Image: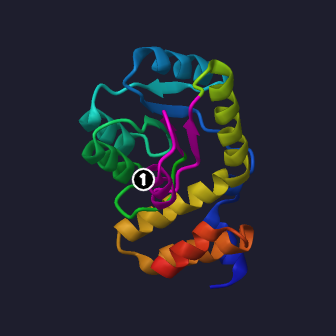
Amino acid sequence: MGNTAQRNMLDNSALSTKNKIQKAILGIPDPNLRAVFRSQLKELGFKEIHSPSDTAATVNLLKQVPDALLIMNWERDPVERAQILTAAQGKVRVDTRPIYLVATSISKELILAGSEYNVARIQTGDMSSASIETYLQSILEEETRVGGLRDGLRRVAEARLQQNYSQADMVLRGLIQTFPSDPYIMTEMADN
């Protein structure tokens, strides 16, 4: 298939650099910290902010709202943490949403999970309103640059779920043309 057809398949609006996240899922058990995040998200213009009550509800929401930012507290049961992070990536483990982890301190396990699950930001230590706003702003700025990439990767995931690997390959090839230096696309091409 030629380049023109590939570009048409990518839908130029999906590759727009004006994407902005407007949904968030707060996996933050502490009510005070959750309130700070909720306040900052509202100030930044988020339209939907979900605060699930437990791991099962979080996993369910991640499936229902595939384009929501996941903000999760690292300090939780390791099995539950893995369930949530796995659900955040979806059935085919593609980087389709930004993930923001908060923790009291940095650890090797946290850094490894950040790499494995394509975590956008890890915040440790100071959880003031100002520091949270800074981290959220940086995620939004990054999403302005890569939002179209995530939309394309969502289409790759959908094609793979339908076992339409030629469609997934075609979308990935179009993404490479638009985002030639993105390491995630290269990784996904290798997995295709």
Residue in the image at 66% along x and 27% along y:
131
Find the magenta span and give its range. 99-125
- Image quarter in which the N terminus is found: bottom right
Q: Position of residue 9 (x, y in %)?
A: 61, 68
Q: Residues within 10 Å of mark 1 (few under 14, many from 20)?
A: few
Q: Is residue 64 above or below residue 172?
A: above
Q: Quadrant of residue 7?
A: bottom right
* Any part of residue 10 in sight: yes
Q: What residue would you read off at disc 1?
A: 109
Q: Position of residue 97 (x, y in %)?
A: 52, 49
In the foreground, 158 or 59: 59
Q: Is residue 94 above or below residue 44?
A: below
Q: Is residue 60 left or right of residue 71?
A: left
* In magenta segment, residue 114: yes
Q: Check disc 1 and give the amino acid type.
A: Glu
Q: Is residue 70 above or below residue 6?
A: above
